[in-house]
Amino acid sequence: MQTIQIGDRRIGEHHPTYVIAEIGINHNGDEGLAMQLIEAAAEAGADAVKFQKRHLPSLYRQDVLDHPERYEQHFQYIIPLLKEVELPEELFPRLMARCRELGLEFLCTPFDPVSAAFLAGLGVNAFKIASADLSNLDLLDRVAAY
């Protein structure tokens, strides 16, 4: 097994288990809840927390975003939910800073190249790729370039 490094932690055989607390979208788009989840992860002994980042216009046509009810049934449910739980970009530096204060690595799953570029600009030490994107070569190439 190959050893990798995220931040100052080595991960692989003969190294301690690396625990990632999945926050994802469980913060419900609320900064206070996101901070509470970060603190709970630190108290539980996690090494990292993981959020999600989407740039919806990169993933969906504008008409789908504006009128999800006109399209397949799942759009009328998923689009409003994703809009509700997407954290504002200006919040990400504060989340990262809180993670650093607590000794946690900040990880995030980008679902599109725009989000990957945003996260790279913040200086994340690693990306977590969603399993559904393991064959998304455009996204993988973009992330690998950072």
Image: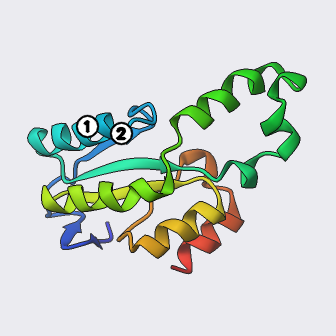
Residue at 23%, 44% in the rendered image: 38
Query: In which image quadrant can residue 43 be found?
Result: top left
Q: At numbered mark 1, what does the secondary structure look like: helix, strand or loop? A: helix
Left/right of residue 14 with respect to residue 32 in the rendered view: left
Amino acid marked by disc 1: Leu
Query: In which image quadrant can residue 21 be found?
Result: top left
Residue 10 location (% of width, % of height): 20, 70
Colouring convention used in this rendered image of the protein? rainbow
Residue at 66%, 28% in the rendered image: 80
Q: Quadrant of the N terminus?
A: bottom left
Look at the picture and state if 71 lies above or below 29: above
- Of residues 82 and 116, the one nearer the viewer is 82
How many neighbours does mark 2 have within 10 angstroms: few (below 14), some (14-19), or many (20 or more)?
Answer: some
Residue 37 location (% of width, % of height): 25, 37
Please report whichever mark, 2 or 1, sits nearer to the chain's N-terminal start. 2
Q: Which mark is residue 23?
A: 2
Left/right of residue 133 with respect to residue 106 in the rendered view: right
Amino acid marked by disc 2: Ile
- Of residues 11 and 40, the one nearer the viewer is 40
Query: In which image quadrant can residue 123 be found?
Result: bottom left
- Of residues 102 and 109, the one nearer the viewer is 102
Residue at 61%, 45% in the rendered image: 132
Residue 6 location (% of width, % of height): 28, 69
Residue 49 location (% of width, % of height): 29, 49
**Of marks 2 and 1, the one in the foreground:** 1
How many neighbours does mark 1 have within 10 angstroms: few (below 14), some (14-19), or many (20 or more)?
Answer: some
Which residue in the protein does label 1 denote? 37
- Of residues 136 and 62, the one nearer the viewer is 62
